[in-house]
Image (cartoon, rainbow, N blue to C red):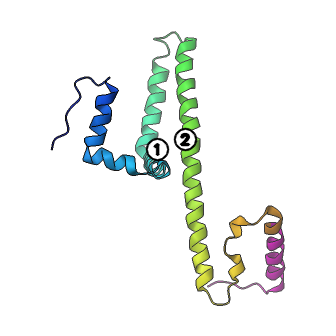
């Protein structure tokens, strides 16, 4: 069964029916907001961290600079780049934080698995990221004492 094209794209009811009847789009609405944001953040992070994105940013700045004389370096001309970069920066903060949170969680889980698998390792070291700052500082002091107590070994 084909999905009917809406006759008027401004008709919200027809667009809702289009989404409901589309096998591809109906799967999207079953995915939770968190998962959709995770996927979007991952794709956006990969895209914005690419050489092509950097080249695009440089191109936008060069084009903006070249158009300065055309617009007599007006306040509006300056406002365009200021507003654009502010909005992009604001949104990128959330994408970067999401990526860092996921990376940190993955690293913690990997380290927790290594600790769990090693005989002789302290299981209390699992979930260190949930300790308070004072508890982490105390643990750091314990490791410094251990380091000072052992003779230095060279790795070959």
Report the residue at 75% width, 66% height from top.
131
Q: Which mark is residue 92?
A: 2
Tell me: residue 84, above or below residue 116: above
Q: Main secondary structure of the magenta part?
A: helix
Residue density around tag 1, few if under 14, some if 14–19, many if 20 or more, within 10 Å: some
Residues shaded magenta: 137-156
Residue 104 at what x, y percent from top left? 60, 61
**Does 132 sit left or right of 57 as displayed?**
right
Report the residue at 55% width, 11% height from top.
74
In depth, the one of 76 and 116 nearer the eye is 116
Quadrant of the image for the C terminus? bottom right
Spatial CA span between label 1 and label 2: 9 Å
Residue density around tag 2, few if under 14, some if 14–19, many if 20 or more, within 10 Å: some
Check the image and name the residue furthest to the top: 72
Check the image and name the residue furthest to the bottom: 119
Instruction: Indicate which label's residue lies in the foreground, 1 or 2.
Output: 2
**Does 156 sit left or right of 147 as displayed?**
left
Look at the numbered discs 1 and 2 and tell me whether their residues touch, using CB distance below 8 Å.
yes
């Amino acid at each position: 069964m084909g999905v009917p094209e809406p006759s008027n794209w401004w008709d919200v009811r027809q667009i809702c029916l289009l989404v409901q009847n589309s096998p591809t789009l109906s799967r999207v609405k079953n995915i939770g907001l968190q998962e959709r944001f995770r996927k979007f953040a991952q794709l956006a992070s990969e895209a914005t961290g690419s050489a092509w994105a950097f080249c695009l940013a440089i191109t936008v700045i060069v084009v903006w600079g070249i158009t300065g004389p055309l617009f007599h370096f007006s306040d509006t001309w300056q406002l365009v780049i200021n507003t654009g970069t502010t909005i992009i920066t604001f949104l990128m903060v959330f994408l970067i934080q999401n990526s860092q949170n996921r990376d940190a969680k993955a690293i913690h889980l990997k380290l927790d698995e290594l600790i769990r698998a090693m005989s002789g390792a302290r299981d209390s070291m699992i979930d260190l990221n949930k300790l308070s700052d004072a508890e982490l500082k105390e643990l750091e002091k314990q490791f410094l004492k251990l380091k000072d107590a052992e003779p230095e070994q060279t790795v070959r």
